[in-house]
Amino acid sequence: MNRTSIETAVGIFMLIGIACVGYLTIKLGRMQLIGGDHYTVSAHFQSVSGLRIGASVEMAGVPVGRVEDITLDLQREDAKVLLNIENHIKLTDDVMASVKTSGLIGDKFILLTLGGSDDLLSDGDEITETESAVDIQGLIGKYAFGGVE
Amino acid sequence: MQKALLSFNPVAALGRLTISLVQEIGRIGLFFVRGLFHIVSVPLQFGKIIHQIYFIGAKSVLVICLTGAFTGMVLGLQGYYTLSKFGSEGFLGAAVALSLIRELGPVLTAIMIIARAGSAMTAEIGIMRISEQIDALKTMGINPVRFLVSPRLAAGLISFPLLTALFDVIGIFGGYVTGSILLGINSGIYFSRVESSVRMTDVNGGFTKAIVFSVVVITICCFQGYYTHTRKEGFGAKGVSLSTTSAVVISCVLVLIVDYIVTSFLL
Amino acid sequence: MNQPLIQFDNVNKRFGDHNVLKGVCLRVFKGEITTIIGKSGVGKSVLLKHIIGLMEPDSGQILFNGEPMAAMKRGERRRLERKFSYMFQGSALFDSMTVYENVALPLKEKSRLKEAEIEKRVLDKLEALDLLNIDEKYPSQLSGGMKKRVALARALITEPEIVLFDEPTTGLDPIRKNAVHGMISEYQKKFGFTGVVVSHEIPDIFYISQRVAMLEEGSIFAEGTPAEIQDSSDPVVQNFIHGLMAPDRETTGMESRKACEVHFLQERSRLNRHGTPFSVIVFTFDNIDELYEKTGHVGGQNVMNHFIDMLRARLRITDTCCRYGLNRVVAIMDGVDNESAGRLCHRLAQEMTGVHLAIAEPGSDKCFRISAGIADVKAEGNLEDAVTAAIYRAAGLYEFQVCE
């Protein structure tokens, strides 16, 4: 094995490896190569049970962003969710965010429903109107044990 | 000394064991630090590093592709039958991708490299030790750790993540082959599940593991070869064979132990 | 005496229960070749490894220019180690590298020479050692003797100040053995390095060394010039030296020097008692260094051996002839007076002048000059005195050229 063929083999190996790393990080991990094509808004929910970081944010079934962070707001005693929204999606200040479930026991996601206001939300603003997750187990329990009128 | 032989003291034996264990860990640690330091000491050894990447990385591509493909395929098969019990075959993509990227990719890649390159590394350095070649390096004023260990360490740090990524990608496609082509899951659903379930932290975690494993594997394998001559239970060729065996066993076990530790830190 | 370059001061070393070195005191002087002799397994290699720092003494110290090596700072120690070169007993060649790469490695790693300059030096060295056509081979493809020469080339490539040879000629055939000795001696003269040689090649090694130390039972048993050691009256030393000299005749077709001395003494006493004449002829190869340069060390030794063969063919069975130093051959002929010895030399000169020893390519004008001197044997004095006298008288007496 002479020097050049070793170098060629190593070159090919590096190319294949870097292509795989690229696939994993950019396509699957959605690494943002260039920042600034997203903006962040926050929303407070009574309960985000089942929602996790990375869940999608949808409008009319179309993904427009993802959940960036979920924290507990101790002062307001509720959950604070940071939403990462694509730049070209303009949200009005009366937009409503609700935690929904895809299917009966599927993943939780955030559904945004636009209102009729003219004022737009910008980076760091808060969505005031929110709807918490439906507590399916609670509902079933009520139904089963006769709590429903 | 005579007294210690006559009356066996279990507490002292435990102490002795602990001391020798700590000493051994310290020696391995120092060995690693020396190797790491000499990666960046000038003049850089590009030629040797490329040679080692060829040996550790490029020559492992085929075996990694094979094991990756079949691991992904068997995951697809097992996952399909388990998930279909709950009627959620659609999650197959997520199951395959996450188990590969988080766990199986780094661990199986490390074990394949131990088998292919790690054992060879120990044997090579061990033979150099017993045939006085390492002493010859010293007499020429060449630092043997710099000459032998540092290029391997550098090549390992580069090759392990790349091979792990290759294993993951091939595995995901392997899962696609069984899940989608053989068992009929919609290919769009498979890949959209793969994409929506994997997060950057999973990918980063996988690479962190790959890098930690590379350090563990290369250090252990080089260390065992380098100190072949200090073995008490076998000399010469016998010593090299014992070193190779223990290098493979110790690094495989350590990979699994370290995997648990790293996982518990990452989660 | 001036200060020794390397000095062992009461050095002890033990491996497990085995006490290898017990208070070794040894001095090595600058510009000299010091030979360490002794039985196998007596710790000669261990001694050598202490000099270069591959082993550290358990107690005692090793002084370099009067400074203890253990107390040196790291940088100082490293600078010192750069002056050393070590030729291993088992060659210790890098078996994954070619011969060329092996020899070039010390230069590549430790010097700032350009690639072309390294190549030139390596090829020069390989050529000098008759290894030029195997530079692309790997050590496992070479014979033991070739490996030794590659190791020698590697040890000398950096032009070190101090070279340690651990049995440089063990396992070589007699011609190559003398070639390696000649090379060590020649390079030592050329570069003036200080050499420490561990060797079993008695008496050949005496010709090239200035000091000899005998290691026995873990300490230096005897130390002195080669002549002092050879003339030592100590039975242990004598036993050791003669035990190794005996098989000489088998391998080189010549008697040992001891045999020559014995023959000389016999003849001298016969001369004293009966007046039977005998003569000592000393043949000196005048331009051996030049010859080595032209034909390589093996070639030079070959030419010499051919000459010795021709000489032996003209001697009678009762005559003795032996090597006396690197470039001298002594013949002792009984019953021949100086006049007929002179005639023999004359005839030899006539016959041999211009004779072509068919060893190298024909047409080359590589000749060597031999001058022959006849000793005027006196009633007293030993062989050495006779030889010295003969050398003194040799100049311009009988000179002839033998060409390849």
Image (cartoon, coloured by chain):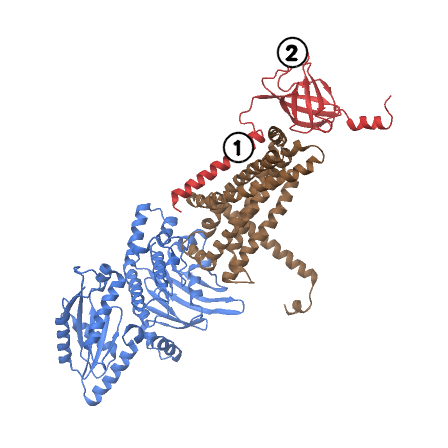
Chain colours: A red, B brown, C blue
**Mark 2: few/some/many CA within 10 Å (<14, 14-19, 20+):** few
Instruction: Quadrant for residue C163, please give it.
Output: bottom left
Residue designated by label 1? A22
Q: Amino acid at mark 2?
A: Asp
- The residue nearer to you, when weighing B238 against B166, is B166
Residue C363 in view of the camera: yes
Is residue B259 depicted above or below C395 in this figure?
above
- The residue nearer to you, when weighing B116 against C178, is B116
* Same chain assignment for discs 1 and 2: yes
Residue placed at 55% from the left, 45% from the top?
B215
The subunit letter for the residue under badge 1 reads A
Q: Are marks 1 and 2 in contact (CB under 8 Å)?
A: no
The subunit letter for the residue under badge 2 reads A
Is residue B161 depicted above or below C267 in this figure?
above
Q: Is residue C354 left or right of residue A89?
A: left
Q: Is residue A99 left or right of residue B125?
A: right
Instruction: Quadrant for residue C242, please give it.
Output: bottom left
Residue designated by label 2? A119
In the image, residue B47 lies at what x, y percent? Answer: 41, 44
Residue C397 in view of the camera: no
- The residue nearer to you, when weighing C113 against B203, is B203
- The residue nearer to you, when weighing A138 against C379, is A138
In the image, residue C94 lies at what x, y percent? Answer: 41, 55
Is residue C353 depicted above or below B116 in this figure?
below
Where disc 1 sits, the SS reads helix
In the image, residue C310 lies at what x, y percent? Answer: 20, 72
Residue placed at 26% from the left, 66% from the top?
C301
Is residue B206 depicted above or below C22 in this figure?
above
Q: From the image, which quarter does the C terminus of chain A lie in?
A: top right
Q: Amino acid at mark 1?
A: Gly
Where disc 2 sits, the SS reads loop
**Mark 1: few/some/many CA within 10 Å (<14, 14-19, 20+):** some
